[in-house]
Amino acid sequence: MNNPLLQNSNAPIDFPSITLENMAAAFDHVLSAHEQGIARIIERQQAQPTWDDLVLAVDELDAQLSGTLYTVIPLVGRDQDWAESILGFYGRTVARFEQKDTDSRLHALYERLARSDIGINLAAMKRATLRWHLDRFATSGAALDEHDKARLAELQAQIGTLREAFVRDIDRPGLLIEDEGELIGLLQRLRDELAARASEAGLQGWLVACESAPTEAVLRQAKHRPLREKLYRAFHTRGVDNDLQEDNGTRLQRLAELLDDKARLLGFASHLELSLSTKSAGSVSAVRGFLQTLAASVQPALQQWREGIGQKALVQGLTRVQPWGVIHLQALPTHAQPSEVFREHFPLSAVVTALARLAQQLFGLELRPARMPAWDASVQTFEVWQDHAPIGLFYLDAVQHAGKQADAVFTTYVRNRRIDAEGIYHAAVVVVNSDIPAALGESEPLLDHLALRKLYHEFGHALHHLLVRTSNNAMSNVSELGTDGMELFGKLVERWVWDAGYLASIAVPDQSGSRLSTAGAAAYLKQFKQQGIEEIGRDLSLALFDLDLHGTPYDGRTLEQRLDDARERCGYWPLADFEHPAHAFDHLVSGYDAGYYAYLWADVHAFDLFTRFETNGLLDRATGQALAQALFEPGASRPLREGLEAFLGRAPSLAPYLSWHGLA
């Protein structure tokens, strides 16, 4: 079929040739092929299920369907028609996989293979794959009777509808500034970026898009307090509606209840228990204990941070700290150099070179620039080689551009590494997205420390995907480690940009020709580190809220009560009466429900893993190879905790994280 989405999976995708029409045709084709293919497999495998004709045959169909979906994710921001088509296909794909995973006939074939002499004598990796499939059938409801399956399908449809509505209602128009006097305090670079956004929208003035990066930049720099208040209120009331039926708070509460109903139907005590059964951190009590320990450790530091912000406010003549003033007060000049100068040392080209060098030195990966068609001219494309052989394709969409989703900082695993029943190798394909502002004029994009962290974090996800050495689609799907298992690899690679020596080694001279010394980098990092306690408080309060909501959604407490309790438990700043962070907490409708703790859990374990590099050298090849063998290469075939202990040579510890943050 002459369709760019239905070509050989090892060929680069011809993105410019994708149209709404051939995309819709491809969607229909792969959905039909998946449904009909599963039916044929069930019919033909009745005599004796086999690895090739059951497991790898289903693997092939799953890979084609998911690969088609994830290929078009970069196109969702083109316009409303593209978004509706792709999101519609996403819903149909989810429904198709749910139908497959609840098919009792298919489940029975996997059970028979696992219990047969053939299954018992399979290699360890294949037995692990069979166990994964059987667990998936169990948690998906394959063993339910027809009445309960109908109820399950009804619940899943309601959940999907509510999630779509929640995401849709977060989007709000940006704030247009027409009076230049309100821009006092904003650096010229930021003013130019806001003017460019306004021009793109056909407006006169300066447009602050309703996105986290530009909003936080203006809140940090603006001296005009009314502007900060207006902007903060607009951003922190997203998803709020006077009509309670259209309010995201109502939707989130109902979602939690429906997810709880679904979990109980499947035999679990709560959605929290069901969610954690598919993750890496352990039981409900283990995760709650982890967060409680962290909250007790963080609370004194957060109280001290709040007092420090209050003292800065008094210096500014303010008797009360308003929520729109916190970021601004925190960023007031200290003895450290301003972070704006920091950016000049890190143009995007130099950072990409540093990422490639890191992959080469630690893991022997080569990122070879390659001319491949992409969805935007700013996207950088690479072939990935190891041991003189191509192993995958890497797309880097680092810069904001027209047709790109807002706040697009994520990694898409387009295709998983696998070997099919014919012995043909299918390479991994991965896309890294970040939200670096586009350069204006002839310059190139520059990265501040937060942008560096984001890019290194997402590159960690890409490395994980590319370094997997399992041979089938299911075990090469690193998302099956759970949100906590996935986030570990991003958080780990972030640690490199917190090392002063490493930062100095990858920096280029600034506009004046001055180089960044290790001491200079350390001064910057000290400043950035002081701001990190606020980030911990925010993430910890949201993680506590998430576990509370999805553990006991029917206990009668409101979202506001849960949020207040969570903030009080860790010492984070109390909410103002107009703030409704849960109404725009999109992580809870995009796979992180009962799993937002993942960022903190991953960060704690990343600090611990990084201690081996601090001891042996940040670019030590032997340590990199040990990391790859213990944690990257097994993919989803091995429990993550086993890999952690194998690499560390001991049980994981909270101590390095607490010590670095001064919380020990």
Image (cartoon, rainbow, N blue to C red):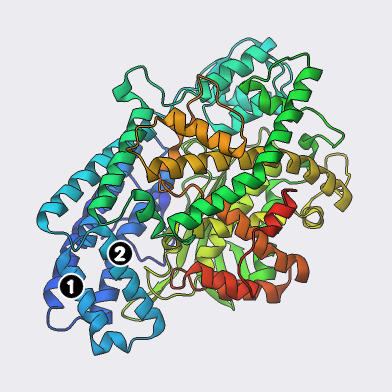
Q: Which mark is residue 286?
A: none
Residue positioned 26% across, 64% down in the render: 138
Q: Is residue 521 left or right of residue 295?
A: right
User: Where 413 falls versus 306 (above or below)?
Assistant: below
Q: Earlier in the sequence, mark 2 or mark 1?
A: 1
Kind of element beneath mark 2:
helix
Residue positioned 45% across, 25% down in the render: 238
> Which percent across, then down, holds residue 503?
77, 53
Q: Nearer the viewer, residue 590 or 654?
A: 654
List the residue tagged with mark 1: 108
**Alpha carbon separation for disc pair 2 and 1:** 13 Å
> Which percent across, then down, holds residue 597?
51, 49
Decide if residue 396 is in sight here.
Answer: no
User: Where 450 falls versus 13 (above or below)?
Assistant: above
Q: Is residue 145 left or right of residue 28?
A: left
Kind of element beneath mark 1:
helix
Residue positioned 32% across, 89% down in the render: 121
Q: Nearer the viewer, residue 40 or 528?
A: 528
How crowded pointer 2 is (Cα within 10 Å; few <14, some 14-19, many 20+) is rated as some
How crowded pointer 1 is (Cα within 10 Å; few <14, some 14-19, many 20+) is rated as some
Position of the N terminus, as image quadrant, is: bottom left
Q: Nearer the viewer, residue 378 or 359?
A: 359
Q: Nearer the viewer, residue 281 or 219?
A: 281
Decide if residue 18 is in sight here.
Answer: yes
List the residue tagged with mark 2: 136
Q: Is residue 88 left or right of residue 288?
A: left
Q: Is residue 412 left or right of residue 556?
A: right
Give yes or no for contact between labels 2 and 1 (Cβ–Cβ under 8 Å): no
> Which percent across, then down, holds residue 466?
52, 66
Amino acid type of disc 1?
Answer: Ala
User: Where 156 falls versus 355 (above or below)?
Assistant: above
Amino acid type of disc 2?
Answer: Arg
